Image (spheres, helix red, strand yellow):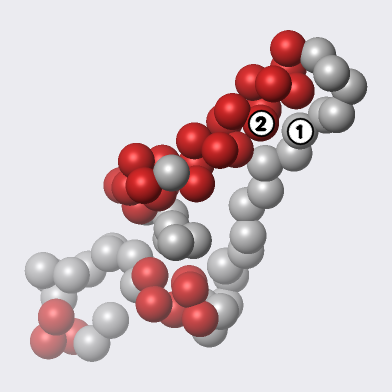
Amino acid sequence: MPPENCPEQRNQPNLETFENGTYPISRRLFVIVKKDGSFDEKAGEAYGKLLLTDEGQKLIEEAGYSPIR
């Protein structure tokens, strides 16, 4: 962060660097679902689908993560 932008933008995530992979410690997050036909599988699939909706992407961004859409 350039000094002239502090303190207004201090400690703000730079989503552009996350998205283009230049931020040195960024990583992808995964949702892993056990495929066994159980209720847990259905809940995991529903959760994964929720994260990909417009509302889910908004919540991801509000939590400080970079949305994928």
Residue at position x 49%, y 61% in the image: 68
| Count of marks overlaid on the render | 2
**Where does the image place residue 24, in percent across and percent down from the top left?**
57, 77
Contact? badges 1 and 2 (CB < 8 Å): yes
Expressed as whole percent of the image width and height from the top left, the position of residue 11 reads 28, 64
Q: Which image quadrant: the N terminus?
A: bottom left
Q: Looking at this view, name the residue that lies furthest to the top.
A: 39
Looking at the rendered image, the quarter that the C terminus falls into is bottom left
- Whichever of labels 1 and 2 marks the residue nearer the N terminus, that label is 1
Q: Is residue 8 above or below residue 61?
A: below
Residue position marked by numbered label 1 in the rendering: 33
Crowding at mark 1 (Cα within 10 Å: few <14, some 14-19, many 20+): some
Q: Which mark is residue 45?
A: 2
Mark 1 vs mark 2, foreground winner is 2
Q: Circle 2 sits in a helix, a strand or a loop, which is it?
A: helix
Please, what is the three-letter code of the amino acid marked with disc 2?
Glu
Q: Is residue 12 above or below residue 50?
A: below
60 vs 49, left or right, is left
Element under disc 1:
loop
One can see residue 26 in this view = yes
Q: Position of residue 6 (x, y in %)?
A: 15, 75
